[in-house]
Every structure is written in C-alpha cells, then in structure tokens.
Image (tube, helix red, strand yellow):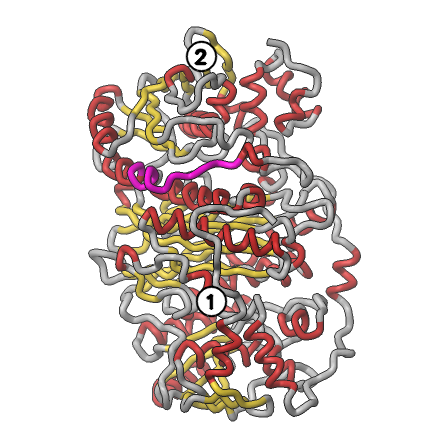
Amino acid sequence: MAIAEGAWREVALSDDEFRRIVTLLGRDPSPVELGMFGAMWSEHCGYKHSRPWLRLLPTDAPWVLEGPGENAGAVDIGDGLAAVFKVESHNHPSAVEPYQGAATGVGGIVRDIFTMGARPVALLDALRFGPLDEPRNRYLFENVVGGIGGYGNCLGIPTVGGEVYFDPSFNGNPLVNAMCVGVARHGDLMRAKASGPGNDLVLIGADTGRDGLHGATFASVDDPKASHRGVIQVGNPFLEKLLLEACLELLRGDDIVAMQDLGAAGLTSSVVECASRGGVGAEIDVALVPRRETGMTAYEVMLSESQERMLLVVRPEGLAGVRAIVERYGLHASAIGRVTGDGLVRVRDGVEVVAEVPAMLFTDACPTYQPEAREDPGIVRRRTAPLDDIPDLTDGDAGRRVLLDLLGSPNGCSRRAIWERYDHTIMTGTVVAPGAGDAAVLRLRGSARGVAIAIDCNSRYCSLDPELGARHAVAEAARNVSCVGGRPLAVTNCLNFGNPQRPARAFQLREAVRGLAAACRGLDLPVVSGNVSLYNETAASAVMPTPTVGVVGVLDDATRHATMVWRSGDEILLVGGDRPSLGASEYLARIHGRTEGSPPALDLDREAGVQRVVRDAIAAAALRTAHDCAEGGLAVALAELALASGVGATIDGEPPAGATNRLDERWFGETPSRILAAGDASAIAGLAERCRAEGIAAFRLGSARGDRMAINGLGEWDLDELRAVHERGLAPLEGVNGQPGVVP
C-alpha cells in the first residue's frame, strides 16, 4: 500500500526523517512500518535530542550490576542482594486524563522492575502542578494523587516517599514522575535480551485494545492544542498484581530466556528492543495476539499501549510449563512468534507480511540532533539581578509572620494530605515512613541491611541556572539519604524539559545534564537508569526545567537509622554550610514575589564531607536525629523538626548570616551542605569534635524543650500555632475515589 503524501507527519516524523527511512530501506515503508518507525524514532523511545548529552553521565562502579540500557538499573547492596530501580514520567497522559495517566505511570514503572526479576518493594513520586487556586490545577492535582494511590494501593506496594512543588509554569503541564525500587538476588536478575533462534515469543497478561495508540509519539511532540484523549492508557491494577506474581514465579524456573514489558510503543518496542539487544531477529503474527476489540488492524495491534502485558522469550520445551503457570493466575499465554537469526523484525497478519525491517534500523539508525543551544537573555537578567533593594526583617513581628507564611504555603506545608492517600505500611518493611525522615528506609527480609530512598529537584534553581540547579538536585537527594543513615550508591533520573528544538530549551537540557554528570562524579554516584520527557510546554510557556533525581542507598544495619524526631533535652547542632543566600530562595519568591538571583554555590567536596560525618555518626548509633536544611532555610527546617517531634526548642545560638549579616539571610536564606543534628549532649559534643577534625563547620544552635519554639532575634511561636498553618496548606483531598470527575 502506497504511503499518502505527508502521512509520516501524523506519526511525528519530519520530512527529512521520512527520506532517511526510504534511503535505509531502499523503498517506501509500508503503513505498519511507518507507524513502527514513528514510535521507535520518537523522542520518548529514541532519545533523539538527549542521547548525545546522556553519554556524559557516569554509569560504571564496582557495585553496579546493571546500568542504562535495560528496563531498570541494579546495584549490589550486600548479602547477595540487588536493589533494582528506575524513575519514569507520565506527564503528557496525566495532563489529559490525570487519574488514568498517573495510575498507568505507576503500573509501567512497576513492570520495569519485576521484568528484571525483582520484587517491587517501594514507590515514590515527584509531582509538579500550577497554583491550586485555579480549578483545573486542583482537578489535576487531586486526580493524579488519586491515580497514584489507587494503583499502588491495589498492587500492595507501599508508596513511601516523594515530593511536590507548585509554580505557574506548570499550568496545563503537570509533571508526574514515578519511581519504583525492587529487590532481587544477584542470580535472579533477568535481562530483556532475546537469544536462541527458534525460541518462542509469548505474550502474557491483558488482551490488546485500542487504548494508548500513538502514546509514544504523543509524548514527543509540541502540540498543545490537539486533543489526545484516545492515546491515554487504561490501567487494571488487580490484573497487574496477577501478572507480577506470575512473572516472578516464571523467573524462578529455567524456561524464560528474556522478558520485556510492553510499555511505550507496545508490541513494537518490546519486540524491536529484545531483538536489537540480542543481535537477533524476530517474527510475529499479529493474528495470534488476543484482542478485546473487534476489527483491529495490524497497525493498531503493533502500536497499542494497552497495559499489563509482558513479552517472554521462552524455550520451546518449556512452553507448556509456562502456560500452566500463567493460567494458574487466571491469565493466558499466547505464542505469537519466534526468535530468528536473520536480524529482521518481521510482522505477519496471517499469511500477509506487513512489515520487514532490520531491527537495528529502528534503534541504532535513529537520528540524533544537537540543535542550537542558547540561554534566554531574560534568564541571565533574572539570575544577575541585584537583590540589595529587598528590605530586611526590621519589624519586630515580621520574622514571626514570615515563618508562618512559609510553613503554610503550598511549597512549604505538610504533605500529609497526599501521603495519607497512599498505603506506606503494606508489606511491613517500612522503617522510616513519609514525614518521619528526609528519606524512606525499608528493611530487607532475611538481612540486617536496609535501603534508603529519596527523590528530589529544586525546579526554581534549575530555571535560573540549569547546570548548578542539576548539581543541587543530585546533592540534595544524596543528602536526604545520608540524613537517615544511608550510604548513597547510585542515581536514577527523569529529565523534564520543554521543546528541545528551541534554543533556550536546548540550552537548559544540555547544561542540566552537564550538571548531573559533574555532581555524580563528584559524589561517586553512577547513573544506572533514567528517562527523558521533553516537549512539556503550552503555547504560553514551558515548564521550569526539572531534572528529577532519585538516589538509592544502603544501611548496613537498618536499626541504626535517624529520623526527624528529637527529644526534650537534646542539644541541636548545625553541621556544615556556608553563608546563606537569598538568591533563588523560597523566601524571595513567596514573600517578595521575585524569582531572581543565583542559586547558592555548591562545593561537592564539602558536601561529601558533611554527609559522611553525619552518616558515620548514625551508623555508630551516636546520632538519632538529622534533617537537611533546604527550601525555606534554617528557620523552616527547625520548625519542621519541632512539628515532627511534638517538642519545641530554644534557639539561642547564631549561625552564619550572609555577607551583609541580614536577619532574613540568616534564618530564611538557603545554602547546601547543611544538616541539623540533635541528640544528647555527649553525642553532639562528639559530632562537633569530629567536624572540627575534618575541617567542617559546626554551630551549636540551642536545645529541644517545651511546647514553644523561640528563635534568637526572629520570634516565638506555640507549636499548636505552627501546626495549624502547616497542616492546612493543602486542603483535604476530595473527589479521588477512582473517578476523574468533571473536568473544570
């Protein structure tokens, strides 16, 4: 069948890319081939604009068991165990159908983990929305949270951590990043690498429908006005739970050669990627694919993104056994093809061959681009704007009001309204739960060890200086892991940016990856997995650049961990840090309405030292309380500790102020490499001595006591007063009972 003029643009291929396909094939592609190229050469699958920069990231370390290129990364955590983890985006679907978009994002990232042979043990999410006083943003927020909780809770996987941030740049463009962590024995890790010509290709799980058609290309174009409801996948978490258990049981045997999730681009990507990784070919017959809708074409079957499906490469002699296990879980296993030795991906529809292309053309021949990258002069002006016209806190009551405002703001308030929608105790492995510490901690069954997990990014920092902001994202996520006692091991990232074909967006992407690479090398953290989500913008604006960073660490003894809870009588020590700055701070944005100034400088050697001394003290059981100083500065961090503990504090010490010795810089300015530590007097004295020996700054701030918090020169508050504003910042979530409701 001839290709209609311009038909390639319907699958997000440019004219030049279509001509490249014709040259590679030596002929026009068939309609099915064109759709497959459109999916595999999309930004979502092909990483056309990011692949050149991703090569900068460090990926190797002695403890890395599996790096980028597989469904997820894996690192050695001791005792023969591996942590398997990855973060991915579901931004574009969530902007259209927030409940299903977020739910299927969770389902997809979970499949990436158990496809590797690991049992998923934890979920985290990183979310971005526009201001909640706008009805549509509130609708997106409530239903995204509902979708995450609805899917994860039904699967029986605890959602143990995450972060959320609000800014007008996310109007109409929510960011929904989901991270999953699993645990496996080293010898149980499975790769998605087809091998053995003659082995069967078996599809298990849900039947195939028309949902999700062109999902990969939808997430790879800048088309804010188009309606894309038809591309949104619909999830079934109960079926996924059956699929999960069936796959883990199958992988305990010897019949499975490879396993690949059907995610973006569905059957196309799973078949192509398995074949390409293994250097083999594959032949399938779409007529053998079980369907839940009649009249589906080969094109629709190949590009459907129906959820809860898995492709297996099975030894022929084991096919009957595989079917028996799958059917015991109420699922079906359909042999739809076989591995071949000719390197071709051949698609039949009965006797008709509808596609026949070398697998490597879909992957290795995908074009890459490095468009002009140029910083927006407006960003330069904002970053270098003088801040000497900001009035200091001279009014005697001003400091009191500022702290209450920051604690009650959407970016500073309690996230209880979110985490209470999630089951974080199921599986009984959660040691440090949401709100109790800077990172989640989970115990490992059969081992004394634990894993610590955090996810983070300061989008405002990245908007003003993407290279420095990305370095901060790595440092803060690692710092959060260290604050609970975890030794950071590796990074997964999700790069959320606007249209890379625009010079300012290309600059942000390039510089952010450079920043990630620099910080990961400086902190000895390999990047083992990740995802890229581009074209996050509307006609009005692009989102703030948000290179989300997830860090996984290990505790040799899970019982030796720290939380945010101090006890009455504890001494309070500020470990590390430099002079704080108002530039790019939450205080400047919230109180003065200005997103200006440069993010604070970051010394990676100092950062590593601060994390190490705190982590060592926790491991030695000499420190039980630690908390990172982040958005909002030192006063906000102290208030958070008091609220988490239910015990007030008298802060009579004076930490460093900025260069001008301002009160607002001292208490609300921001700078990295600062951790608040609390414990009995002897433990804190020992930690201060270790800091002095290591050349790390340490300042005694005061002690924990009573039911009030008093900060030297700033003000005094009842804990009940602080708690009231902190808890009401996000109103209780409503309308998230599994139905998306009325679209505002």
Q: Give left or right: position of 430 versus 267.
A: left
What is the x, y in percent for residue 577?
Answer: 55, 77
Name the side, left or right, on which 496 lies relative to 266. right
Q: Vertical placement of 349 versus 292: above or below? A: above
Which range of residues does the magenta coloring cover? Answer: 232-243
Decide: few, some or many residues near mark 1? Use Cα within 10 Å; few <14, some 14-19, many ≥20.
many
Point out the frontmost of discs 1 and 2.
2
Give the x, y percent position of residue 681.
36, 90
From the viewer's perspective, tell me whether residue 22 is left or right of residue 718. right
The residue at which mark 2 appears reads as 349
Q: Using the image, determine if residue 321 lies above or below residue 539.
A: above
- Say which residue appears at 38% left-offset and 49% top-offset: 152
Say what secondary structure mark 2 lies in. Answer: strand
Give the class, few, some or many, for how many residues have Cα within 10 Å of label 2's Cα (few <14, many ≥20).
some
Figure quadrant of residue 323: top left
- Is label 1 in contact with label 2 (beta carbons under 8 Å)? no
Q: How far across and how far down the image is residue 31, in percent?
A: 58, 16
Q: On residue 159, which mark appears?
A: none
Kindly identify the amino acid type of the residue bearing the numbered disc 1. Arg
**Residue shown at 27% from the left, 41% from the top:** 188
Residue 441 % position (x, y): 35, 63
Per the rendering, the mark at residue 479 is 1
Residue depicted at 76% across the width and 53% down the height: 376
Circle 2: residue type? Asp
